[in-house]
Amino acid sequence: MDLTLKVWRQPNANTPGQIVTYAAKNVSPNMSFLEMLDVVNEGLIAKGEEPIAFDHDCREGICGACSMVINGLPHGPQRGTTACQLHMRAFKDGDEIYIEPWRAKPFPVIKDLIVDRSAFDRIIAAGGFISVGTGSPPDANALPIGKEVADLAMDAAACIGCGACVAACPNGSAMLFTSAKVAHLNMLPQGQPERDERTLKMVSQMDAEGFGNCTNYAECQAVCPKEIDIQFIAKMNRDLIMAAARHGTKKGTGKTEAL
């Protein structure tokens, strides 16, 4: 396969970027998208040019690092697939492929296709944990959990924090990410003691980072590589209202503030 790549190149956050055209020759349909970029970069390095900077780590759809928009879609055209799991057989010989970084104010470009997603880390640090005593592990059946609840909690925990939901949302909302991180703890017995505090702090941090509000476009669900359901946004909103009522805060249009 011979392809034409239109790649966003930007040396740093303070320098304007632009689309640069590259030829990708003799691409195997069995290559992953990142392997194809590796081959293109090898050619650029051989010519003494700067390689395309892009994020990656596990290349197994686990870490969420491979954040890029491919032909206008976060992670590319296949549902439930990260960019590292996308294979070149999804494209046709002669195709023109546009490759860009996530586009969201809280995700500033670091270089080329790499963005700073530390806003997600700060949301989790605000309350995405449980405080428990350490020691020998308890018996597996010490805390009985119904299968339906356990399954839903596992569905929420499947979120890999890649940021595709933010990149796809017209509002740049992080509600799907935050609700998944809130829900998988709030639904389990271990998460109940800090449920209200966790919800209030994580939503407040999400707002402070500058993410937009959810207006139910559901683009986030459509592009999520782990197919996280937007029902978790509704669950988080319910928990937020309950927590605000119990702890003397008020919930407006996506903003949480002390009374």
Image: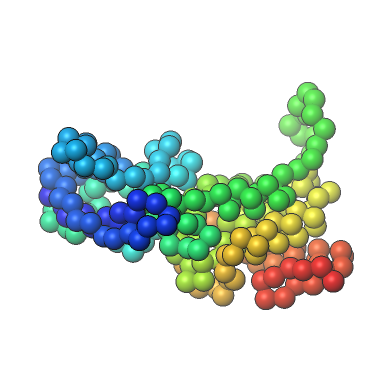
Residue farthest along the front direction in this orientation: 14
Q: Position of residue 81 (x, y in %)?
A: 39, 50
Residue 90, percent from left and from top: 25, 52
The quadrant of the picture occupied by the C terminus is bottom right
Residue 99 higher or lower than 141, as above or below: below
Quarter location, residue 199: bottom right
Q: In which quarter of the image is residue 201?
A: bottom right
- Between 154 and 32, the one nearer to me in the picture: 32
Q: In this view, does 142 lie above or below 93?
A: above
Residue 241 visible here: no
Give the percent coordinates (x, y) of residue 235. 68, 63
Nearer-the-camera pick, 250 or 226: 250
Q: Could you say where residue 251 lies in the image, as x and y percent from the top left? A: 75, 72
- Please give left or right for residue 211 compared with residue 253 in the image: left
Which residue is found at the position 76% from the left and 34% from the top? 141
All told, the count of numbered labels is: 0
Q: Residue at x 59, y 65 (%)?
A: 210
Q: Residue at 47% of width from left, 71% of height from top?
A: 170
Residue 240 falls in image quadrant: bottom right
Does the rendering let one see residue 52? yes
Colour scheme of the rendered structure = rainbow
Q: Nearer the viewer, residue 186 or 20?
A: 20
Side of 105 where 244 appears, left or right: right
Compared across the picture, whether 87 is left or right of 67 comes to left
Is 20 left or right of 79, judged from the image as shown? left
Outermost residue toward the top in this view: 136
* Residue 134, placed above or below residue 82: above
Q: Residue at x 73, y 32 (%)?
A: 140
